[in-house]
Image (cartoon, rainbow, N blue to C red):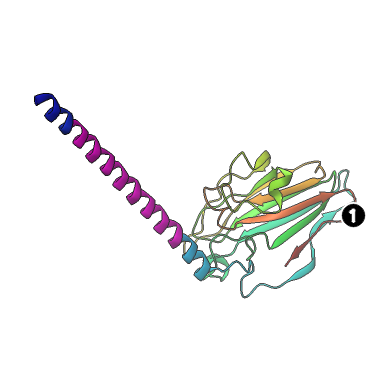
Amino acid sequence: MVLALALHERLYGEVVLISNVKKAAIAVLIVAIVLIAAFALTVALYHPMNTVMSDGQKVSNGYIAYNKNSSVPTAYIHLCNWGVGNGHSNAYPFNFNGTSYGAMTIYLPAHINVKLTLTDYEVKPHTLKIELPYPSQWARGPIWAHTSVHVQKVINSTGVVLPIWYGNTAHSRSIWWNNTEPGKYWLVCGLTTHAEAGMYIYVIVSSSITKPYYTIK
């Protein structure tokens, strides 16, 4: 009788423990679903994935400064994060030149040097990182888990560009990309979740491209 009672109490305790674990797991799942839904709703309301801000324009052959006559032909690309510092106080915070979600594509000749400068007019810090993703990942962009599983090589990075604060001067940083190799690349913000939130540009490097240019779709 005593043994049966002890066994009953043990089984009852295990049932209660399993029940509590299940409740905790369900609670965590509910919180995760709510957070994901809130993020998706915020992005959808604040910046639908049409990729270009309302005051941006489509571009089919945008000019990029290019010195073809130097010892090594060199392109100069100046990107900025639209924000309060350049008159776009309502700008979606995860943008390059008013675009996001890969709306901009930059085309570069192979085997040139590129100087890239990032100016941050936003009240959030950002970075500019050149990445070579695996071919199977390039077209979809870094909008999901942006990890080493998706990126085979980092070419260079500015590190953190400090944000602008009201009344202060915008901060800038520059990096070099020397001897561009043919391939398909991303320019991204390397801070956690920024690329996933749409802060990336497609880059195509090819020997068939004779001068650098960009498009905005």
Would you say 17 lies left or right of 144 here? Answer: left
Above or below, 152 relative to 118: above
Q: Bounds of the magenta span? A: 10-38
Label 1: which secondary element: loop
Would you say 63 lies left or right of 31 here? Answer: right
Q: Residue at x 85, y 46 (%)?
A: 110
Viewer-proximal residue, 47 or 35? 35
Q: In the rendered structure, does residue 59 fall within the stretch colored magenta? A: no
Q: Residue furthest top?
A: 3
| Position in image of residue 93 (x %, y %) | 53, 62
Q: Which residue is mark 1?
A: 210
Viewer-proximal residue, 35 or 29? 29
* Magenta-colored segment: predominant secondary structure: helix
| Position in image of residue 103 (x %, y %) | 68, 63
| Position in image of residue 19 (x %, y %) | 27, 43
- Screen quadrant of the N terminus: top left
Viewer-proximal residue, 171 or 183? 183
